[in-house]
């Protein structure tokens, strides 16, 4: 059965974010949202068929108006469905106890080095059945959808053994198939050094590069390969090995870089041709410059800085230097237990000197590029997937301005209304 076409009309502001399908937007381009006032969209067969002023679109489809579901967007904004290019949603358990420990002075790395942190979630995730992991993770996807998110990336990395890494990726695959949100998979076997390899981390690097990565590629379990490059976790040398081994197998490199300490992670991202370098709280001037030169997307996670009570990444500087910037929740049980991408936009404005327009670009077209989907999603242009969100605010600036609130009014996924 084919779905009825949808006409969205009279959007106070239709935020198209047009013009960046080929390449992520940089510098001043990030501030130009290509807004159409009193805008309209005609959606058909899961795709955007036409974009323009209400009058123009109504005239163009005047002979077919009776067929369509008509959505009135007066006094609201309509924009591309939000995209989160960095999450760790497939996990079991939660870590509010560590939140409490941190409030009492413990640091994130201390907790991790004492067997908590990623290790604690790894134990829980190993114990959980596929079905348990699926149902816990599905709740997080439901919550993302309520915040206007239509596509996310999801990483493994709470297995640190093949069996569990595979289980996480298979759960993510099933979520992609059964949930309306698209879930794009990243292998992150190198998320922490498992306790049994503590004194011999290179042995674990060997397992990741020689056993796990070939399995991921053979079984088509992920598109991207990520590593936590951080002092006390994986060194730049080990990270380079892991990223290059994945690249040889066709897995696109991503990297958790310079999150806690400067460690030349941004430089490594530029060197290996990573699609994105994420976190970057402590990225060096040189690293930022090299990312700009190579077009590496900076995926910034100001919610993580907020929750770890750390200084945010230098988002303003990165944009000014020409780095294409995207934003993400980093949704995970330790450093950022949230699904509110709109709140992340507010933090980007408050803590990184980004404008509301830049924050929107960073959560739409630039986020799409960070997961290699710039041609399909992230802007409202003819031929793109009809992934659309209507927000109950009259102009885009009110989105981060009324902070900590959920303005999501309607979500359309693949041309179907999935939330209203
Ligand atoms: O992106 N930094 C490493 N990994 C995650 C946190 C994982 C966790 O604490 O469970 C992050 O912040
Ligand atoms: Fe992360």
Image: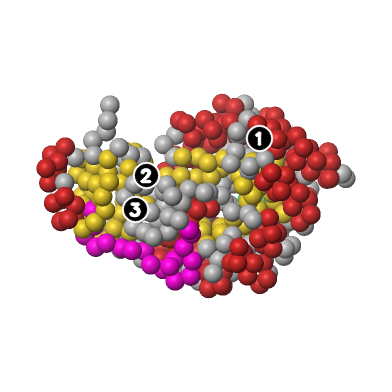
**Residue 339 in sight in this render:** no
Q: What distance separates the C-alpha of mark 2 from that of mark 3?
A: 8 Å
Mark 2, secondary structure of its residue: loop
Q: Is label 1 in contact with label 3 (beta carbons under 8 Å)? A: no
Residue 331, disc: none
Give the secondary structure at mark 3: loop
Q: Specify whether 50 is left or right of 405.
A: left
* Circle 1: element type: helix
* Marks 2 and 1, the one that precedes in the sequence: 1
**Left or right of 129 in this view: 182:** left
C-alpha gap between disc 2 and disc 1: 28 Å
Q: Residue at x 24, y 47 (%)?
A: 42
The stretch in magenta equals 23-40
- Residue tagged 1: 216
Left or right of 392 on screen, residue 38: left
Quadrant the N terminus occupies: top left
* Residue 34 part of the magenta-drawn span: yes
| Circle number at residue 380 | 3
From the viewer's side, name the closer residue of 124 and 183: 183
Give neighbour class at mark 1: few <14, some 14-19, many 20+ (Cα, 10 Å): many
Residue 185, image x and y in percent? Answer: 57, 40
Q: Which residue is mark 2?
A: 385
Are there few (<14), some (14-19), or many (20+) residues within 10 Å of tag 2?
many
> How does the figure colour the protein chain or chains?
secondary structure
């Amino acid at each position: 059965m084919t779905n009825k076409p949808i006409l969205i009309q009279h959007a106070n502001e239709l935020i198209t974010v047009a013009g960046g399908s080929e390449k992520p937007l940089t510098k001043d381009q990030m501030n130009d949202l290509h807004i159409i006032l009193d805008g309209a969209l005609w959606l058909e067969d899961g795709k955007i068929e036409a974009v323009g002023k209400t009058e123009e679109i109504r005239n163009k489809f005047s002979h077919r108006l009776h067929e369509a579901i008509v959505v009135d967007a007066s006094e609201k904004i309509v924009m591309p469905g939000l995209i989160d290019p960095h999450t760790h949603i497939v996990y079991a358990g939660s870590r509010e106890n560590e939140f409490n420990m941190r409030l009492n002075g413990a640091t994130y790395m201390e907790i991790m080095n004492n067997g908590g942190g990623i290790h604690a979630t790894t134990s829980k995730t190993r114990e959980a059945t596929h079905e348990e992991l699926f149902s816990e993770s599905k709740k997080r996807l439901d919550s993302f959808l309520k915040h206007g998110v239509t596509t996310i990336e999801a990483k493994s990395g709470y297995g640190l053994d093949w069996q569990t890494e595979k289980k996480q990726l298979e759960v993510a695959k099933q979520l992609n198939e059964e949930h309306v949100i698209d879930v794009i998979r990243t292998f992150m076997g190198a998320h922490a050094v498992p306790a049994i390899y503590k004194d011999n981390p290179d042995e674990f690097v060997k397992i990741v590069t020689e056993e796990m990565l070939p399995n991921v590629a053979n079984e088509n379990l992920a598109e991207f390969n990520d590593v936590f490059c951080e002092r006390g976790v994986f060194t730049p040398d080990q990270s380079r090995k892991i990223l290059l081994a994945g690249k040889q197998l066709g897995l696109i490199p991503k990297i958790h870089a310079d999150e806690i300490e400067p460690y030349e992670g941004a430089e490594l991202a530029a060197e290996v041709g990573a699609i994105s370098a994420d976190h970057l709280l402590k990225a060096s001037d040189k690293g930022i410059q090299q990312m700009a030169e190579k077009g590496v997307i900076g995926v910034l996670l100001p919610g993580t800085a907020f929750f770890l009570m750390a200084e945010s990444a230098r988002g303003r500087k990165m944009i000014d230097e020409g780095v294409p910037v995207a934003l993400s929740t980093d949704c995970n049980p330790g450093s950022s237990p949230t699904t509110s991408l709109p709140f992340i936009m507010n933090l980007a404005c408050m803590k990184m000197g980004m404008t509301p327009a830049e924050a929107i670009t960073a959560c739409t077209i630039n986020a799409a590029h960070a997961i290699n989907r710039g041609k399909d999603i992230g802007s409202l242009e003819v031929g793109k997937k009809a992934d659309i969100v209507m927000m109950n605010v009259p102009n885009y600036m009110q989105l981060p301005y009324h902070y900590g609130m959920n303005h999501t009014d309607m979500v359309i996924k693949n041309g179907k209304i999935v939330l209203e």
